[in-house]
Image (tube, rainbow, N blue to C red):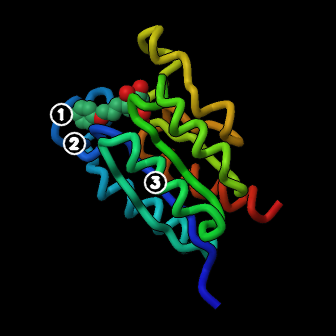
Amino acid sequence: MSEPVVLLLSGPNLNLLGERDPAVYGAETLADHVAVASAAATERGLALEHVQSNHEGDLVDAVHAARGRCAGIVVNPGAFTHYAWAVHDALATFDGPIVELHLSNPAGREPWRHTSVVAPVADGTIAGFGGAGYRMAVHAVADLLEA
Ligand code: CA2
């Protein structure tokens, strides 16, 4: 039998990681983070799928495609975190565990980053641990699946 699939969803501008703002977001590329998340998934007997988009509707479509097919979701919605209610509504239709992930700690940054519209439909949030958060988020989903 094939392993349960965890969907890693990456929002806008995260495709530029490693190219700018290393002081805030680190020097690693998104591909580096996906590799870390994949390795963590393998450790836990899970498979990882990754979707990155700069378009809100694509992220909504990816959540829809995950319904009934993926076991859990790790989502770094990028700036959509703070206002994309369509992403919130799509995630609310997903039955498995959802972990919200951020490289930085939005709570310690500008006031407009303090609101997350994703947090109410996530089981929990991992923020401020840089790239290590990708490993932590996959393990959090795995723990919730095993609970
Ligand atoms: O800390 C995070 O992971 C964020 O989700 C990153 C978002 C930001 O809007 C959230 O408040 C927190 C921004 C991602 C932008 O990524 C860039 C990558 C390279 C260069 C510039 C931006």
Q: Could you tell me which residue is drawn at 30 percent across and 42 percent down?
A: 54
Indicate the amino acid at tag 3: Asp
- How many callouts does the rendering have? 3
Between 73 and 90, the one nearer to me in the picture: 90
Ligand 1's image quarter is top left
- Indicate the position of residue 1 as horizontal and vertical percent values: 65, 91
Indicate the amino acid at tag 2: Leu
Label at residue 20:
1
Q: Are marks 2 and 3 in contact (CB under 8 Å)?
A: no
Question: From the Cβ of disc 1, is ligand 1 less than 8 Å away?
Answer: yes
Residue furthest to the right: 147
Q: Could you tell me which residue is drawn at 33 percent across and 42 percent down?
A: 55
Label at residue 61:
3
Indicate the amino acid at tag 1: Arg
Residue count near mark 3 (Cα–Cα under 10 Å), binned few <14, some 14–19, many ≥20:
few
Label at residue 16:
2
- Indicate the position of residue 72 as horizontal and vertical percent values: 63, 59
Q: Could you tell me which residue is drawn at 57 percent across and 40 percent down?
A: 100
| Local secondary structure at mark 2 | helix
| Left-right relation of 104 to 71 | left
Q: Specify the quadrant of the image occupied by residue 89.
A: top right
- Indicate the position of residue 41 as horizontal and vertical percent values: 55, 68
Question: From the Cβ of disc 2, is ligand 1 less than 8 Å away?
Answer: yes
Gap in angstroms between the C-alphas marked 3 and 1: 28 Å
**Which of disc 1 and disc 3 is earlier in sequence?**
1
Q: Could you tell me which residue is drawn at 48 percent across and 47 percent down?
A: 60
Quadrant placement of the C terminus: bottom right
Does residue 103 appear in the picture of this structure? no
Residue furthest to the bottom: 1
